[in-house]
Image (spheres, rainbow, N blue to C red):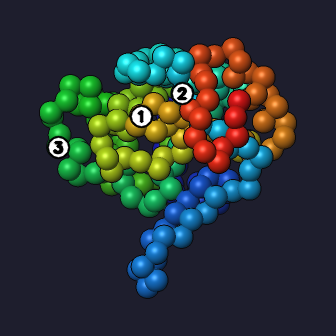
Amino acid sequence: MIKKLKRNYCLIKYRNLPLQYFDKETDSDIFYTPKHKSFYWIKLTDCKKDNSKKLIDELIKLISSLKIENLIFLDEIEKPWISKHTSKRTDFKKLTKALEYFKLNKIWTKFNGGVLVSKLDWKPFLKHFYEITKCDSSFFFYNFIDKDQKIIFYIHYSGEINITTLNEEIDIEFLKQIKDTNFINSNRENTNQI
């Protein structure tokens, strides 16, 4: 199941999602980041080649091992999911297919809310989500969180994944389950290591 959620609903219900806002008066960004236990950056063991399928498969394996059933996706910035410019692009076949998928699910140029995605739809959703992430420089700052708000995920266009654990229990479980995947540390500074 893929269900669209109003942005204000997500802001109230899923308060642990990161947010940002540009304040024109002070000409600065304002950020909200929830209190967290740990902050990890991971990547596939074989990350030299583009292996989108393996990345998504391993991410789904990890999320499933954490006994998560639903994910909520939301952009940190209040803007439409698909920009008007991107909606007209036809220069890259995988991007075109991803755009068709999002349009079919009514996640398009006027929608700026959240999206709840159940486990059965993770594979196609994440596949197309990552394709747009790689191809569209304006498609960034989309985080996704479990319904219980214990863990936050973010996929970078490079294929690296940011994992933010929000409590001790999920942090311990994440460190246990990550060992059964093909993910390793990205070795970014100022992050926790697996």
What residue is shown with label 2?
Answer: 43
User: Exactly how many numbered labels are in the figure?
Assistant: 3
Q: Secondary structure at mark 1?
A: loop
Inter-mark Cα distance, 2 to 1: 9 Å
> Around disc 3, counting alpha carbons within 10 Å, would you say few (fewer than 14), some (14 to 19), or many (20 or more)?
few
The quarter of the picture where residue 42 lies is: top right
Which kind of residue does numbered mark 1 sit on? Ser
Three-letter code for the amino acid on which mark 3 is drawn? Lys
In this view, 86 is above or below 186 = below
Q: Mark 3 highlights which residue?
A: 88
Label at residue 158: 1
Q: Specify the amino acid type for callout 2.
A: Lys
For mark 3, give the secondary structure.
loop
| Dot placed on the residue nearer the N-terminal end, 2 or 1 | 2
Q: CA distance from mark 2 to mark 3?
A: 31 Å
Q: x, y percentage for residue 10?
A: 59, 54
The mark that comes first in sequence, 2 or 3, is 2
